[in-house]
Image: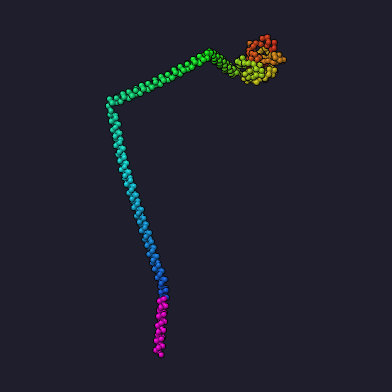
Amino acid sequence: MKGTRNKFALSSLARIAISSISAFAVILTSSIAPAFASHRSHHKSSEASQSFHSSRHSKKHHEEEASSSRHHSKKHKVAEEKSSGRHRGKAVSKAYREHLKRLAARESKHHKLSAHERRLAAREKRGHEQRLAAKMHKLHEERLAKLHRRHSEHVAQSTSRRHRHSASNPGHDARLAAHNRRLAAIEARHQARLAKRLARMSASERKQTVQNMALHSGSIVRAATAFEGTRYRFGGTSRSGFDCSGFTRYILGNTAGVEIPRTAMEQYNNGAPVSRSEMKAGDLVFFKNTYRHGISHVGIYTGNGNFVHAANSHRGVVVESLDSAYYANRFAGARRVTGRE
Protein backbone atom coordinates (compact mmCIF):
# COMPACT_ATOMS: atom_id res chain seq x y z
CA MET A 1 0.00 0.00 0.00
CA LYS A 2 2.67 2.32 1.12
CA GLY A 3 4.69 1.57 -2.01
CA THR A 4 1.71 2.08 -4.26
CA ARG A 5 1.13 5.44 -2.73
CA ASN A 6 4.76 6.40 -3.39
CA LYS A 7 4.46 5.38 -7.02
CA PHE A 8 1.27 7.35 -7.40
CA ALA A 9 2.94 10.39 -5.86
CA LEU A 10 5.89 10.12 -8.22
CA SER A 11 3.72 9.75 -11.21
CA SER A 12 1.74 12.79 -10.11
CA LEU A 13 4.90 14.81 -9.70
CA ALA A 14 6.10 13.63 -13.08
CA ARG A 15 2.90 14.65 -14.71
CA ILE A 16 3.03 18.05 -13.00
CA ALA A 17 6.60 18.54 -14.11
CA ILE A 18 5.79 17.60 -17.69
CA SER A 19 2.77 19.87 -17.75
CA SER A 20 4.80 22.73 -16.31
CA ILE A 21 7.58 22.11 -18.85
CA SER A 22 5.07 22.02 -21.68
CA ALA A 23 3.40 25.19 -20.43
CA PHE A 24 6.77 26.88 -20.18
CA ALA A 25 7.57 25.77 -23.71
CA VAL A 26 4.30 27.11 -24.91
CA ILE A 27 4.91 30.47 -23.22
CA LEU A 28 8.43 30.61 -24.52
CA THR A 29 7.28 29.80 -28.01
CA SER A 30 4.54 32.41 -27.86
CA SER A 31 6.99 35.06 -26.68
CA ILE A 32 9.79 34.27 -29.15
CA ALA A 33 7.66 33.75 -32.28
CA PRO A 34 6.56 37.42 -32.70
CA ALA A 35 10.08 38.71 -32.25
CA PHE A 36 11.39 36.19 -34.70
CA ALA A 37 8.64 37.08 -37.13
CA SER A 38 9.37 40.82 -36.79
CA HIS A 39 13.08 40.19 -37.26
CA ARG A 40 12.37 38.11 -40.30
CA SER A 41 10.02 40.73 -41.77
CA HIS A 42 12.58 43.49 -41.10
CA HIS A 43 15.23 41.40 -42.77
CA LYS A 44 12.99 40.87 -45.76
CA SER A 45 12.12 44.62 -46.01
CA SER A 46 15.80 45.58 -45.82
CA GLU A 47 16.58 43.10 -48.53
CA ALA A 48 13.73 44.50 -50.66
CA SER A 49 14.89 48.11 -50.14
CA GLN A 50 18.45 47.12 -50.99
CA SER A 51 17.26 45.36 -54.12
CA PHE A 52 15.09 48.43 -55.05
CA HIS A 53 17.97 50.87 -54.54
CA SER A 54 20.32 48.63 -56.42
CA SER A 55 17.87 48.28 -59.30
CA ARG A 56 17.25 52.06 -59.36
CA HIS A 57 20.96 52.75 -59.30
CA SER A 58 21.54 50.30 -62.11
CA LYS A 59 18.68 51.83 -64.11
CA LYS A 60 20.07 55.34 -63.64
CA HIS A 61 23.50 54.08 -64.56
CA HIS A 62 22.11 52.50 -67.72
CA GLU A 63 20.26 55.73 -68.58
CA GLU A 64 23.40 57.79 -68.08
CA GLU A 65 25.36 55.39 -70.23
CA ALA A 66 22.65 55.56 -72.91
CA SER A 67 22.53 59.40 -72.82
CA SER A 68 26.31 59.64 -72.93
CA SER A 69 26.37 57.22 -75.86
CA ARG A 70 23.69 59.29 -77.63
CA HIS A 71 25.60 62.50 -76.91
CA HIS A 72 28.80 60.98 -78.22
CA SER A 73 27.00 59.68 -81.29
CA LYS A 74 25.39 63.14 -81.88
CA LYS A 75 28.72 64.88 -81.50
CA HIS A 76 30.24 62.38 -83.82
CA LYS A 77 27.42 62.97 -86.32
CA VAL A 78 27.80 66.78 -86.10
CA ALA A 79 31.52 66.45 -86.52
CA GLU A 80 30.98 64.22 -89.53
CA GLU A 81 28.48 66.74 -90.99
CA LYS A 82 30.89 69.61 -90.41
CA SER A 83 33.72 67.71 -91.94
CA SER A 84 31.54 66.71 -94.90
CA GLY A 85 30.32 70.33 -95.23
CA ARG A 86 33.88 71.57 -95.20
CA HIS A 87 34.70 69.01 -97.79
CA ARG A 88 31.71 70.08 -99.86
CA GLY A 89 32.62 73.76 -99.36
CA LYS A 90 36.15 73.05 -100.41
CA ALA A 91 34.89 71.15 -103.42
CA VAL A 92 32.47 74.00 -104.36
CA SER A 93 35.11 76.67 -103.85
CA LYS A 94 37.53 74.66 -105.91
CA ALA A 95 34.95 74.27 -108.70
CA TYR A 96 34.14 78.01 -108.48
CA ARG A 97 37.82 78.90 -108.71
CA GLU A 98 38.16 76.65 -111.73
CA HIS A 99 35.10 78.33 -113.26
CA LEU A 100 36.63 81.75 -112.66
CA LYS A 101 39.85 80.59 -114.22
CA ARG A 102 37.96 79.40 -117.31
CA LEU A 103 36.13 82.75 -117.52
CA ALA A 104 39.39 84.65 -117.16
CA ALA A 105 40.95 82.49 -119.85
CA ARG A 106 37.98 83.09 -122.13
CA GLU A 107 38.13 86.83 -121.45
CA SER A 108 41.85 86.94 -122.14
CA LYS A 109 41.28 84.97 -125.29
CA HIS A 110 38.62 87.46 -126.34
CA HIS A 111 40.95 90.37 -125.69
CA LYS A 112 43.70 88.69 -127.63
CA LEU A 113 41.75 89.06 -130.86
CA SER A 114 43.80 90.65 -133.56
CA ALA A 115 43.17 94.14 -134.87
CA HIS A 116 42.03 92.65 -138.15
CA GLU A 117 39.33 90.59 -136.46
CA ARG A 118 38.12 93.66 -134.53
CA ARG A 119 37.95 95.65 -137.76
CA LEU A 120 35.98 92.83 -139.38
CA ALA A 121 33.56 92.77 -136.44
CA ALA A 122 33.09 96.56 -136.60
CA ARG A 123 32.54 96.40 -140.35
CA GLU A 124 29.97 93.67 -139.91
CA LYS A 125 28.21 95.74 -137.28
CA ARG A 126 28.16 98.82 -139.53
CA GLY A 127 26.86 96.76 -142.39
CA HIS A 128 24.08 95.37 -140.21
CA GLU A 129 23.12 98.87 -139.05
CA GLN A 130 23.09 100.17 -142.63
CA ARG A 131 20.93 97.28 -143.79
CA LEU A 132 18.55 97.88 -140.88
CA ALA A 133 18.38 101.62 -141.65
CA ALA A 134 17.69 100.92 -145.32
CA LYS A 135 14.95 98.50 -144.38
CA MET A 136 13.32 100.99 -141.99
CA HIS A 137 13.57 103.75 -144.61
CA LYS A 138 11.89 101.51 -147.16
CA LEU A 139 9.08 100.67 -144.74
CA HIS A 140 8.63 104.37 -143.94
CA GLU A 141 8.40 105.25 -147.63
CA GLU A 142 5.85 102.50 -148.18
CA ARG A 143 3.72 103.79 -145.28
CA LEU A 144 3.93 107.37 -146.62
CA ALA A 145 2.94 106.21 -150.10
CA LYS A 146 0.01 104.30 -148.64
CA LEU A 147 -1.13 107.34 -146.67
CA HIS A 148 -0.76 109.54 -149.75
CA ARG A 149 -2.88 107.14 -151.80
CA ARG A 150 -5.55 107.12 -149.10
CA HIS A 151 -5.55 110.92 -148.93
CA SER A 152 -5.81 111.20 -152.71
CA GLU A 153 -8.69 108.74 -152.74
CA HIS A 154 -10.44 110.66 -149.96
CA VAL A 155 -10.00 113.98 -151.80
CA ALA A 156 -11.28 112.44 -155.01
CA GLN A 157 -14.29 111.00 -153.25
CA SER A 158 -15.04 114.33 -151.55
CA THR A 159 -14.70 116.20 -154.84
CA SER A 160 -16.98 113.76 -156.61
CA ARG A 161 -19.54 114.04 -153.83
CA ARG A 162 -19.36 117.83 -153.95
CA HIS A 163 -19.80 117.79 -157.72
CA ARG A 164 -22.73 115.42 -157.47
CA HIS A 165 -24.28 117.58 -154.77
CA SER A 166 -23.72 120.73 -156.83
CA ALA A 167 -25.26 119.07 -159.87
CA SER A 168 -28.31 118.04 -157.86
CA ASN A 169 -28.46 121.50 -156.13
CA PRO A 170 -27.57 124.21 -158.64
CA GLY A 171 -27.75 127.13 -156.15
CA HIS A 172 -25.83 125.41 -153.37
CA ASP A 173 -22.41 126.87 -154.23
CA ALA A 174 -23.82 130.39 -154.49
CA ARG A 175 -25.59 130.03 -151.16
CA LEU A 176 -22.45 128.63 -149.57
CA ALA A 177 -20.37 131.54 -150.89
CA ALA A 178 -22.90 134.09 -149.61
CA HIS A 179 -22.92 132.37 -146.22
CA ASN A 180 -19.13 132.47 -146.05
CA ARG A 181 -19.17 136.18 -146.91
CA ARG A 182 -21.69 136.85 -144.15
CA LEU A 183 -19.55 134.92 -141.68
CA ALA A 184 -16.49 136.93 -142.72
CA ALA A 185 -18.37 140.21 -142.25
CA ILE A 186 -19.59 139.16 -138.81
CA GLU A 187 -16.08 138.14 -137.83
CA ALA A 188 -14.70 141.48 -139.06
CA ARG A 189 -17.30 143.43 -137.04
CA HIS A 190 -16.55 141.35 -133.99
CA GLN A 191 -12.83 141.99 -134.33
CA ALA A 192 -13.46 145.73 -134.76
CA ARG A 193 -15.63 145.88 -131.64
CA LEU A 194 -13.07 143.90 -129.69
CA ALA A 195 -10.26 146.23 -130.77
CA LYS A 196 -12.34 149.28 -129.87
CA ARG A 197 -13.17 147.81 -126.48
CA LEU A 198 -9.55 147.01 -125.80
CA ALA A 199 -8.60 150.56 -126.82
CA ARG A 200 -11.19 151.96 -124.45
CA MET A 201 -9.97 149.72 -121.68
CA SER A 202 -6.42 150.85 -122.27
CA ALA A 203 -7.45 154.50 -122.31
CA SER A 204 -9.47 154.01 -119.13
CA GLU A 205 -6.52 152.37 -117.41
CA ARG A 206 -4.21 155.17 -118.51
CA LYS A 207 -6.71 157.78 -117.34
CA GLN A 208 -7.13 156.06 -113.99
CA THR A 209 -3.36 155.98 -113.52
CA VAL A 210 -3.13 159.70 -114.27
CA GLN A 211 -5.96 160.43 -111.84
CA ASN A 212 -4.33 158.47 -109.04
CA MET A 213 -1.04 160.27 -109.57
CA ALA A 214 -2.86 163.64 -109.52
CA LEU A 215 -4.72 162.79 -106.31
CA HIS A 216 -1.47 161.83 -104.61
CA SER A 217 0.33 164.95 -105.83
CA GLY A 218 -1.41 167.19 -103.25
CA SER A 219 -2.45 169.76 -105.89
CA ILE A 220 -6.20 170.43 -105.91
CA VAL A 221 -6.13 171.99 -109.39
CA ARG A 222 -4.13 169.11 -110.90
CA ALA A 223 -6.44 166.54 -109.35
CA ALA A 224 -9.58 168.38 -110.48
CA THR A 225 -8.43 168.79 -114.09
CA ALA A 226 -7.33 165.12 -114.21
CA PHE A 227 -11.01 164.13 -113.87
CA GLU A 228 -12.04 166.17 -116.88
CA GLY A 229 -14.38 164.11 -119.05
CA THR A 230 -15.87 162.08 -116.16
CA ARG A 231 -19.61 161.71 -116.68
CA TYR A 232 -22.20 163.61 -114.66
CA ARG A 233 -24.51 161.69 -112.34
CA PHE A 234 -27.00 163.38 -110.04
CA GLY A 235 -26.04 162.55 -106.44
CA GLY A 236 -22.79 160.90 -107.57
CA THR A 237 -19.71 161.07 -105.39
CA SER A 238 -17.34 158.55 -107.03
CA ARG A 239 -15.33 158.12 -110.22
CA SER A 240 -18.26 156.43 -111.91
CA GLY A 241 -20.05 159.81 -111.89
CA PHE A 242 -20.22 163.14 -110.01
CA ASP A 243 -22.61 165.96 -109.44
CA CYS A 244 -21.19 169.45 -108.72
CA SER A 245 -20.97 169.27 -104.89
CA GLY A 246 -19.99 165.57 -104.94
CA PHE A 247 -17.07 166.45 -107.26
CA THR A 248 -15.70 169.24 -105.03
CA ARG A 249 -16.11 167.11 -101.89
CA TYR A 250 -14.27 164.15 -103.51
CA ILE A 251 -11.36 166.29 -104.79
CA LEU A 252 -10.77 168.19 -101.54
CA GLY A 253 -11.19 165.08 -99.38
CA ASN A 254 -8.73 162.92 -101.39
CA THR A 255 -6.19 165.64 -102.16
CA ALA A 256 -6.09 168.04 -99.20
CA GLY A 257 -7.58 165.65 -96.64
CA VAL A 258 -10.37 168.13 -95.79
CA GLU A 259 -13.93 166.95 -95.19
CA ILE A 260 -16.54 169.45 -96.42
CA PRO A 261 -20.36 169.22 -96.34
CA ARG A 262 -22.25 167.39 -99.03
CA THR A 263 -24.50 170.06 -100.67
CA ALA A 264 -23.54 173.29 -102.44
CA MET A 265 -25.48 175.44 -99.91
CA GLU A 266 -23.70 173.82 -96.94
CA GLN A 267 -20.31 174.25 -98.62
CA TYR A 268 -21.08 177.94 -99.29
CA ASN A 269 -21.90 178.50 -95.60
CA ASN A 270 -18.85 176.49 -94.40
CA GLY A 271 -15.90 178.27 -96.05
CA ALA A 272 -14.34 181.68 -95.49
CA PRO A 273 -15.55 184.34 -97.98
CA VAL A 274 -13.01 185.50 -100.59
CA SER A 275 -13.42 188.41 -103.02
CA ARG A 276 -13.07 187.73 -106.72
CA SER A 277 -9.87 189.77 -106.97
CA GLU A 278 -8.24 187.73 -104.16
CA MET A 279 -9.23 184.26 -105.36
CA LYS A 280 -6.50 181.61 -105.56
CA ALA A 281 -6.34 178.30 -107.35
CA GLY A 282 -8.19 175.70 -105.27
CA ASP A 283 -10.88 178.05 -103.93
CA LEU A 284 -14.52 177.09 -104.39
CA VAL A 285 -16.68 179.26 -106.65
CA PHE A 286 -20.48 179.26 -106.23
CA PHE A 287 -23.39 180.08 -108.52
CA LYS A 288 -27.07 180.75 -107.88
CA ASN A 289 -30.33 180.20 -109.68
CA THR A 290 -28.98 177.54 -112.04
CA TYR A 291 -31.55 174.79 -111.79
CA ARG A 292 -33.30 176.04 -108.66
CA HIS A 293 -33.53 179.22 -106.59
CA GLY A 294 -30.59 180.12 -104.35
CA ILE A 295 -27.08 178.63 -104.21
CA SER A 296 -27.35 175.64 -106.53
CA HIS A 297 -23.96 175.06 -108.20
CA VAL A 298 -20.25 174.91 -107.20
CA GLY A 299 -16.89 174.46 -108.89
CA ILE A 300 -13.12 174.69 -108.20
CA TYR A 301 -11.18 177.77 -109.32
CA THR A 302 -8.11 176.82 -111.40
CA GLY A 303 -6.70 180.37 -111.95
CA ASN A 304 -6.70 182.76 -114.92
CA GLY A 305 -10.48 183.22 -114.62
CA ASN A 306 -11.27 179.50 -115.22
CA PHE A 307 -12.92 176.85 -113.04
CA VAL A 308 -13.57 173.11 -113.32
CA HIS A 309 -16.93 171.66 -112.39
CA ALA A 310 -19.39 168.82 -113.07
CA ALA A 311 -21.60 170.78 -115.46
CA ASN A 312 -24.52 168.53 -116.49
CA SER A 313 -25.43 165.13 -117.89
CA HIS A 314 -24.47 166.21 -121.44
CA ARG A 315 -20.94 167.47 -120.78
CA GLY A 316 -19.79 165.92 -117.49
CA VAL A 317 -16.73 167.41 -115.80
CA VAL A 318 -15.40 170.33 -117.87
CA VAL A 319 -13.24 173.45 -117.53
CA GLU A 320 -15.01 176.76 -118.27
CA SER A 321 -14.47 180.49 -117.89
CA LEU A 322 -16.05 182.56 -115.18
CA ASP A 323 -16.55 185.33 -117.77
CA SER A 324 -18.92 183.26 -119.89
CA ALA A 325 -22.36 184.87 -120.09
CA TYR A 326 -24.22 182.10 -118.28
CA TYR A 327 -21.89 181.82 -115.26
CA ALA A 328 -20.96 185.55 -115.08
CA ASN A 329 -24.64 186.42 -114.55
CA ARG A 330 -25.07 183.71 -111.88
CA PHE A 331 -21.78 184.10 -109.94
CA ALA A 332 -22.54 184.17 -106.18
CA GLY A 333 -19.06 184.40 -104.65
CA ALA A 334 -16.01 182.36 -103.64
CA ARG A 335 -15.08 180.50 -100.46
CA ARG A 336 -11.73 179.29 -99.18
CA VAL A 337 -12.02 176.02 -97.30
CA THR A 338 -10.62 176.30 -93.80
CA GLY A 339 -8.09 173.68 -92.72
CA ARG A 340 -6.01 173.67 -95.92
CA GLU A 341 -2.97 175.68 -96.88
On the image, which quarter does residue 98 sit in? top left
Q: Is residue 233 left or right of residue 41?
A: right
On the image, which quarter does residue 235 sit in? top right
Q: Where is residue 17 drawn, in percent x and y?
A: 40, 81
Q: Is residue 222 magenta?
A: no
Quadrant showing the N terminus: bottom left
Q: Residue at x 63, y 16 (%)?
A: 231
Q: Residue at x 37, y 60 (%)?
A: 55
Q: Is residue 17 left or right of residue 216?
A: left
On the image, which quarter does residue 41 sit in? bottom left
Q: Residue furthest bottom?
A: 1
* Pick the front one: 265 or 240: 240
Q: Is residue 115 above or below residue 329?
A: below
Quadrant showing the C terminus: top right
Q: Where is residue 257 drawn, in percent x and y?
A: 63, 20
Q: Residue at x 42, y 75 (%)?
A: 27
Q: Is residue 162 left or right of residue 200?
A: left
Q: Is residue 23 magenta?
A: yes
Q: Where is residue 202 drawn, in percent x and y?
A: 56, 16
Residue span colored magenta: 1-26
* Pick the front one: 98 or 261: 98
Please state the total of marks drawn on the protein image: 0
